[in-house]
Structures are given as C-alpha cells and as structure tokens.
Amino acid sequence: MQLDVFESMNTISLEDYQRREHLLAKIKDRFSTYGYQQIQTPTFEQYDLYKTITGTVNRDEMIKVIDPTGKVLVLRPDVTIPITRIIATNKQIPSGEKRFYYISNVFRNSIEQQDKKEHTQAGIENFGQNTPPLDAEIIALAIQTISDLGFKKFKLEIGHAGFFKELLKQINISEQNTSQLQQMIQAKNFSELKPFLETLSIHTDVKVALQQIPFLYGRPEDVMKRAGTVILNERMNYTLSNLIEVYELLKIYGLEEFVSFDLGLINHMDYYSGIIFQGFVENFGKPVLMGGRYDTLAEQFDTDLPAIGFACDVDAIFDAMEGEGLFSKKTSPLDIMILYTPAKQREALTAAQELRELGYRVITSLDSTPTISEASFIVRYKENVNTIKDQHNTRLFYNQEELMKQLLQNKGEL
Amino acid sequence: MDYLTLAMAKGRTAKQTISLLEKAGVQFPDFDEKTRKLIFYDQEMLIKLVYVKAIDVPTYVEKGAADIGIVGKDNIAEAQADIYDMMDLNFGKCKFVLAGTSNELHNQGRKLTIATKYPAVTREYFKRRGIPVETIKLNGSVELAPLIGLSDLIVDIVETGTTLKENGLKVMETIDAISTRLIVNKASFATKSASIHSFMNKLEQALEV
C-alpha cells in the first residue's frame, strides 16, 4: 500500500517558512521592547496537571502518551498553565514582577480538522501585579504587536470575566441551564434569551441584567453610559470603574480607535478572572489574539500570584497576512555567488571568507555557471581576468580592494 | 468602502428572504431562484450575495467567508457554529419534532435508534433528557426509516405535519421552534461594525412594515 503523505501531514513550503520566521521575528522584537524575556516550557506535561485544573482545555482534545512507568503525559496543550506552574512552584525564582514571552507549539486533537494537531502560539505572561496601568500596558502591547505586522484596520474587544461570573453568583440555577445561558449570551441570541430567562425563577434585577449584558458592546463611551443596568453591587461597580480606567489609559497611548467594549464577552477558558480581550483583523473570521487576567490560576498551586497574558494564534495571523498581501516580496537568500577556475581557487576562497566576515551571504563554486540564480552579484575569478556582475552591467577588478569598492558602491542594491 | 458578504440559504426560505431584502432596499436585479449563478451584487448598498446550501450557511459565516448569513435555526443548531445569532426574521417558521408510529416512547431498557437529518440536535436533546440513543444520519425521506424498521423514531422539521400524517407517523414531542435568523461572523461584527449595524437596522425597519 502506498503511504498517503498528504492526508495526515502538513507540508510547509520553504518560502512560507521564511515568511513565518520573519513574522515571528517582528513579534519577538515587539515583546522585548516591553521588557519580556523568552522562555520555553517542556513539550511533555503531566496529564494530572490539566486534569485537576477545571475549565481549561477539553480533555478529549489533549494528545496523551503513556511513559514506561505507566504515567500519563500530554503534549503541551496550552502554555499559560505550565508557565504558571513553573513560576508558582519554583521557590528559587525571586519574587517581584516577572515578564516572559514564548513562541511554542501547542498540540490538540481537533475533530473538525484531523490533520491540524499542531498550532504555534506566540504570547506573553506577566506575573506579580494587578493594576489598571498594567492591564492597559498589556493591551497596548497586544495592539502594537498586530499593528507591527502591517494590519491597518483591526479591533480589540475588551470585556471582563467578572460581570457574567458575578451575575451567576446571584442566582442558583442548574449546570445545564448555566451552559445554555452562557451559549445564548455568547451568541448574542436576543430572540431566545428573553423567553429562556422567563422560565427561570430568579430575581428580576438579575433577569434584566442578564438580558442586557449581550447588548453592552460597541464604543467604550456608549457602553459605559448604558452599563448601569447590569451593575448590581459594589463589586461590579468597582470592576466597571477599573475597565474605564484602563480605557482612559489607552487614550494616553493613543490607541483608543482600536478598542471596543463587549461586556457580554465570555472566554471559554474558565480560569480568566478579570479583564479579557480578543483581537480581530479585517477579512479574517477568527480572533488572531486572545488573552486576559487570570489571578486565581496559581491558587491551584497554593500560591497567590496575580497574572495577565495573551497569546497570538500564529497560524491564523499568517493566513490573515497572506490574505491581505502583507508579506513583502520574496527576498534573495544570497548576496554574492563566486565562481572560479582551479588556478584561482586560493584567491576566490580567501575573498569569500573575507566577505563572510563582513556579513555578506556568499557561496562559492568551481564551476562556470551559477548554481543559484538569485544572487545579487556574480563574481568570477578566471585565468586572466576577474569580473563582478550585477543586474545591469559587468565590471572588471584586479584585487580584493577593488572588489570591495565595487560592492560598497552598489550597497544600496543589497 | 468594502462589500458586505451575505450568505443566503437555498431552498424553502429563499423567496421570502429576497422579498424581505427588497423591502429593506437591498436588491439583486439578476437574481432568480432557478439560476445557476452563485454570486449577486447590490452595487448601491455594497452587498454581495452568495447563494449556498442551507446547511453550509453557518460554516460560511463562522469561517468568515461571509460576514452575515440568513438561514433557518434548524441549520444553525445542527452546525453548532461559533457565531452571533442576532435577529429573528419571523418567517420560515416550523418545529423540530420527535415522531414515531405510536404515541409512546417505547423504551424497554433498549437503546433507541433515531433517524434524522440533524444528528447533533438529536443527540443534544436526548442528552438533556438523559436518554441514551443512537442516531442514524439520513439526507432525505426521513419518514421512511421507522416504517421499514431502520429506526424506532425520527427527529425532523415539520411545517404542517402533512407528510408525517400521510406516512402514519405521529408527533410525540416538540423539541424546539424554528424560524429564519440573521447570523453574524464574530470578527466581522468587530471590524465592520458600522455597516453590519446599518444593515440590521434596515432589516428591522422592513420587518416592522
């Protein structure tokens, strides 16, 4: 039987790989301008780590492996939980604020896309603080990251996990009703939400608030004005004023045009406890970035550790950039191709080494025709004449000094 | 400004959808139900209509191939797509029902088999009721299944119930009400907020007339 290599494997083209690296380099540069340092978590994690933490990755989606001792391991299904585990449990790490970023692959079984088990995420995690200025800074970083990649029109939707969670605390309904309610709010399903709420025996205030919450989206100023109906207690009031403070700070960053509010936003990751957000770019159907505050996650490791972070879906960003034509034209992988005759070998190889020292990308060949056609310059060492050729013309040179002069004159072309 | 892409379901609701759109001032002059063409433009309102199979509408919208869609709740529920289900257009009304040859859910500790075009909806309903079932996915003439012993019961959509009656089947339970909905892609909702809202306002006005 012939192996069907296309059915279950993803093949990435050389050019796509270069583009991806370019994209990742830009993201990394931006993360480091906010003082984040790269780390990496192990590819294998203990299944128990994910089993005990509720409301994270669907257990059926995790890719499990059994080691020789019978222990069940999973291929890293998410990055936030392992990083939190490392920071929360390692007492050797000095206390104080910590800033980390990662570029990691996460592994999940997807029923819809059986051939897509691996996704690249690029994200940041910040530990140790919970203040509106920090939340605003993280959101500013998220916006700048997307903007760096060339997207002109995009929106970051900001909500807060506290609103829905607090409303749920006020009522006592079955788990099934809770999930149905959550689904309707997430789908902004106004036509079914109202009759559904009528069937629940809950207090009128909460009923009105639950009915209003999916409507509370749009321009932050408008949402703030209309939010009064869902604020039932002091805690929710405090949450709203924090959100407003974050928005005011984003104005100082000059980024308010990219922000909208959605108080009905509910993230499927249950561990979020505070501000949550997701980023959308034009003409792409999925969020390209998601994040939020998860102050209570470290409690699972008996540590009190406020934390906030976000992750970019690199595969989604790549597709969106391709769709919008945001990748620059193909760049040549080579600056100089040196061709030489046997008698000129020493001269040619010495020249190549010197050029490489200076940072030029050079390959040499004992051949008369270039083996790679994409070089910006073709340099030939022949028995009695040396030439350098660019796109337009061919010039002679007699020694290394002259070669360098020619290259420097044409530096603009590289 | 860019076009807003609207995915419209082929089939029983297409005519009513087009007439509602016309009332809202959105017109596709070269549209005709029997056409083979799949894309139509309203150049004035900047709306691009894609004419696709009903069950595919939620997929087009979820993946962002269309910004908005007009399709029955039956297909939305079956697709379980992550979209905004924002407006009830109040036409194409029918019901999801459970039907069989007798009036009783004959369940003598044996697993029930249900034939349906809507396996996801069926499983969800019986899960909620705590009854184990096996579903058989059929693509048409579902009424036939219990008559020739392929299944115990069926889950299907009914408008008048005539087809069921003619085949000697009775409605045992109503699972859910169905009507045509306006659905919206979540990303488009954020990035094309202004044009989507203006489209929704026009539809709302047309519905009130």
Image (cartoon, rainbow, N blue to C red):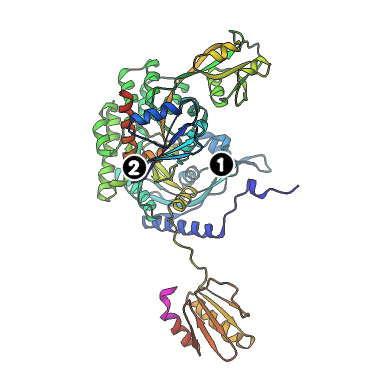
Q: What element carries label 2?
A: loop
Nearest the eye: A390 or A301: A390
Nearest the eye: A398 or A254: A398
Q: What element carries label 1?
A: loop
Residue occupying image coordinates x 64% and y 86%: A342
Mainly helix, strand or loop, the magenta region?
Answer: helix
Q: Position of residue B161 (x, y in %)?
A: 52, 13
Nearest the eye: A306 or A152: A152
In the drawing, does residue A168 fall left or right of residue A120?
left
> Is residue A366 rendered magenta in the image?
no
- Mark 1 to mark 2 CA distance (whole Å): 31 Å
Q: Position of residue A231 (x, y in %)?
A: 28, 28
Residue occupying image coordinates x 76% and y 47%: A1
- Height in image: A408 above or below A176? below
The amino acid type found where label 1 is placed reads Arg
- Height in image: B100 above or below A108? above
Query: What residue is disc 1 on?
Result: A108
- Height in image: A392 above or below B29? below
Q: Quadrant of the C terminus of chain B?
A: top left
Residue occupying image coordinates x 50% and y 87%: A396
Query: What residue is disc 2 on?
Result: A130
Q: Where is residue B79 in the image (x, y as percent from the top left)?
A: 51, 31
Q: Where is residue B193 in the image (x, y as percent from the top left)?
A: 33, 39
- Residue A304 visible within the image: no
Disc nearer the start of the sequence (1/2): 1
Q: Specify start and end residues of the magenta stretch as a single range.
A: A407-414
**Front: mark 1 or 2:** 1
